[in-house]
Every structure is written in structure tokens, then in C-alpha cells.
Image (spheres, rainbow, N blue to C red):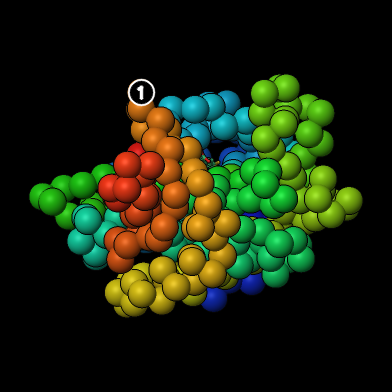
Amino acid sequence: MDVKDIKAGIKGTIGKEIFFYETVDSTNTVAAILAEKGVEEGTVVVADSQIRGKGRLGRHWASPPGVNIYMSVVLRPEIETRNATLITIMASVACAKALRRVTGLDVTIKWPNDLMVSEKKLGGILTETRLARKRIKYAITGIGVNVNLDLDTLPDVIRELATSVKRETGRCFSRTEVIKGILTEVNKWYNILKGKKYSELIFQWKDLTSTLGRTVEIILGKETLRGFAESVNDEGMLIVRLPSGASRVVHIRA
Ligand code: BTN
């Protein structure tokens, strides 16, 4: 990966400062330490591999070296805490648009944070927010994308559910180019979030999602919710129609 090349191609605050590491515990953890130290909004942490890559719901994120993208962006949005879900919505729109443009794949978003191709997971987003005095002090948006990964290197359970850009297109892609594409789109969509144009974000998300209009199963701690995914509300939360006919608003759990 060529950080100088990435920086040179970026116009905007996201990616103006990039820290690159060969190996980290988790880019989200490193970015949070930097955020606590007061780094500027838009600072990005990229790693070639992660030892303890984090997925949602405390899951491990497989992060082998040399093949994929693991990066985290420090954000300091001045939005209400009830709109924090929109940070993940913003990042998933940005990633799906960038991956479509750079790879030509028909990438869709599975609520809330999965980047999908042909019903398999190509990548994911993990946003961790730190609140102070009921405001968002900072948010770390971690992005993982399987780019040149050979799936046979994955454990059996993950292999059946996952895919990579290489697997879907039959060729390798430059991670530098994919990162440039993603950061360019994050700059665009983050400005839309900061400008509080929430309905535009939701509109784009709805256009890119494969979740709505389908029966879904959502793991909520010990409970698994089954129902029909009707819509997302203005705050980015999923509205599910339950078999009883009642509707339920589902929040993202990090
Ligand atoms: C998920 O789908 O469960 C979210 C996966 C998020 C993975 C990325 S890789 C970069 C960043 N650092 C982490 O430890 N996790 C996120």
C-alpha cells in the first residue's frame, strides 16, 4: 500500500492525515487512542494486518496480511446522539458507492453495516462512539474489505458466508486504489451528514440496500428477531413488521 499516493489523491479532510502500520491489534483501537490524544477529524489509520480485528457483537474479524483493507477514520460530527446510527449509514453508502465504481461489482448493503455481493459478505463497518456530556466526543468508523483474499485461507464457518473482490471478479485489485476510492466517497458523504441532509443519506442507503422488502433474522443479544424489513426511519433504524402484526424499531448494536 502506498500512503503517499493515497494522500495525494484525496481532496478533503478525510485522509489528509494517514497513519500506516504493518500490524496492529485493531485499527479501531489505535484510532481511538489517537482521537483521545486530540488528532484532527479525518485522521485515518490503515494496517496491513490486525491481530485482534473486531467485528460487530464482539466477533473476531479475520485480518490476514497482504490482501485486504483494514482502516479506521476518526470523526467528530456535531450531530445529536440519537442520529449516531447515521454515521454507519453514511460509511456504508460511501463504501458501497466506491466499491461499485472501482471494482464494477454490484455491491449492496445489508442492514446495518454489511457490504454484500451475491448474498455473501465482502466487507463490514464497525462504528464505535465515545460520548461526553450527551454529545458525540468522537466516533471511530472502522472499515474492513476483503480485496485480494483467497477464501480457502478462511476457517470453514466464515468461508461459506464471505467473499472477496478477487473471488467475484477473478482478478487482483490495488488496495491503494480501493482505499482512495473509499476515502473520496467518505469525504463526500460525510459532508452530507455534517450538513444534516439526513433524508439524502437515507434515500441513497435505501437505493443500495438488499435488506428492505425481505424477511430478516436479526440477532439482538440472546434474542433473535424474525420479521419483514419494511423501512428505515429518519435516524437510520430498521423498522421490522413482526409476525404478530406489530412493528418494531431495531437499533444497531456495536
Ligand atoms: C462487521 O461486519 O462485523 C464489522 C467489521 C469491521 C472490521 C473493520 S477492519 C478495520 C476496523 N478495525 C477493526 O478491528 N474492525 C474494523
Task: Name the foreground residue: 114 vs 53.
Answer: 114
* Mark 1 surroundings within 10 Å by alpha-carbon count, few (fewer than 14), some (14 through 19), many (20 or more): few
Q: Name which quarter of the figure residue 254 lies in.
A: top left
Q: In the visual, does 4 lie left or right of 195?
A: right
Quarter of the view holding residue 207: bottom right
Residue 127 location (% of width, % of height) = 40, 47
Q: Nearer the viewer, residue 240 or 42?
A: 240
> Is ligand 1 within 8 Å of the beta carbon of the residue shown at mark 1?
no
| Residue at left offset 44%, top offset 49% | 228
Which amino acid, mark 1?
Answer: Lys
Point 72% across, 50% down: residue? 118
Which residue is found at the position 66% from the left and 28% from the top?
158
Residue 59: x and y in percent read 49, 27
Return the residue found at the far left: 133
The reply to whether residue 247 is visible in this rendering is yes
Q: Residue furthest right?
A: 170
Q: How many marks?
A: 1
In the image, what residue occupies the spot 64% across and 43% down? 121
Q: Nearer the viewer, residue 112 or 75?
A: 112
Residue 100 horizontal/vertical position (percent): 69, 65
Task: Name the residue that disc number 1 marks.
Answer: 222
In-front residue for pair 160/211: 211
Give the secondary structure at mark 1: loop
Q: Is residue 37 visible?
A: no
Residue 26 in picture, x, y percent from top left:
50, 34
